[in-house]
Amino acid sequence: MTSNTRVRFAPSPTGALHIGGAHPPLFNGLGARHIGGSFILRIEDTDLARSTEEHERTILQGLSWLGLDWDEGPDVGGSHGPYRQSERREIYLRHAHDLVRSGQAYCEGEAVIFSVPKGRTVAFDDLVYGHIEMESDTLKDVVLIKSDGFPTYNYAVVVDDHLMEITCVVRGEDHISNTPKQLLLYQALGWETPLFAPLPMILGPDGAKLSKRHGAVNVLGYREDGFLPQALLNYLVRLGWSYGDQEIFSMAEMISLFSADDVNHSASRFDVEKLRWLNQHYLKTLDPAAVAPELRWHLARAGLDADTGPKAEDIIVALRERVHTLNEMADKARVWFGPLAGYDDAAVAKHLTAAARAPLQAAQEALAALQGWSAASVHDALNAAAQGLGVGLGKVAQPLRVAITGTQVSPSIDHTVYLAGQAEALRRIDAALGKLPA
Ligand code: GLU
């Protein structure tokens, strides 16, 4: 393949961008970037009954969230939109009429139908499974234009892949059975055929076709479930392709190492635990500033106002060792937003005892005196307070943790206090002092 390689992703907007079908855009996009070729997006919206603008929007959102952008298309205010088959109807009609004129297709009512030639062997070599053959006698005639004037998938795909100069058709292997019909159409139209690379499907952990009952299937559903696009991309790429034993790939590495030769030949099973592991890896290793916009999105969904609470970057640093997903993170961060919702009885009974008065007061004094508020300055203030009392830091940290979070579990005490903010931390210590037995 060369930089003249042109590949495409051609979703039908009859549903969201489905995780089981996410390999085609990913591999097309990566493949094109790898060789400096072009990646084209074509919306195949000719099934009027099932296509909706809403589905198209979610597909585009899914691609954009994954960072898979396409290279060309009709101009829409400075950028390029996807090609849409519904906007290309005249082209399909024109070529269908050519086929009628040359006696290779016939009209039936408003519809135009291709007469499949008899006695032909349709053979092709695809890049994944090798040689495939089919007798044309086993095929029925192919509707090209339906009576509603719109083209069928098998016909429009041929016209477009030809006119868009697609050199390699990379798509789900569920289309292998359509390929012979499409080849006959290429031949009838006198066009050269592209290469075909059918991609194995993604299955659920039970080996059945991935579906809703396995959890989220919409790519954006993984966003809602708290995954980072970097993790999902890495996961998906590794699921259908391998490069030795390497598990972690940056986008740059995916692009530079990706090769169609290493695409798996068999379906792969979706393993959400592996995805969670990868997600935590990216939470821990990406620059917090890169993760922050995603966390803010989750905070907003959780009803937390990111503008008034602690900085998203600080939350990420405090919690990324403790969670696997961003919604777990947003949920744990709730404690630093607004007033404390309540106390855990066991935590209060254990730590907010009369013995906690001196440590809490010492912490309060030290924190109140702080000029610069940071996790590090909080750390020093609390150490100094503990030293002043001649006790270990734990004696101060335990009641303080309950005072700040209402519970006995939270990240390190310096982050826990820091994230509450100085004024709120002091208020919460006051409230805790008020709960101590006399
Ligand atoms: N619109 C078809 C689909 O979504 C595309 C198949 C192809 O890539 O040729 O399945």
Image (spheres, rainbow, N blue to C red):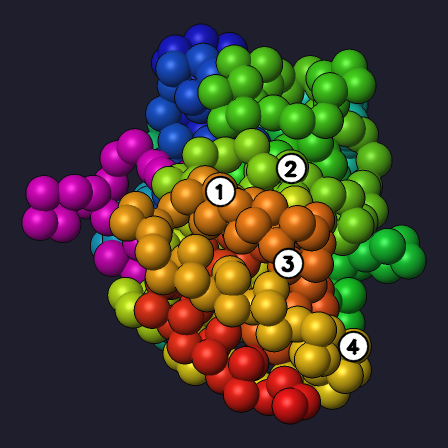
Q: Quadrant of residue 422?
A: bottom left
Which of the two discs, 2 and 4, sits closer to the camera?
Answer: 4
What is the CA distance from the residue labelled 3 to the residue labelled 4? 13 Å
Q: What residue type is labelled 1?
A: Asp
Which of the two discs, 3 and 2, sits closer to the camera?
Answer: 3
Disc 1 secondary structure class: helix
Sequence-wise first label, 4 or 1: 4
Disc 2 secondary structure class: helix
- Residue at figure coordinates x 70%, y 32% from the top left: 238
Q: Which amino acid does label 2 sit on?
A: His
How far from the left and from the top, in percent, is residue 393? 66, 50
How far from the left and from the top, in percent, is residue 3? 39, 11
What is the CA distance from the residue labelled 2 to the residue labelled 4? 35 Å
Quadrant of the snapshot with the C terminus: bottom right
Sequence-wise first label, 3 or 2: 2
Horizontal side, residue 133 vs residue 118: left or right: right
User: Which numbered tag is attached to residue 281?
Assistant: 2
How far from the left and from the top, in percent, is residue 318? 54, 49
User: Which numbered tag is attached to residue 380?
Assistant: 1
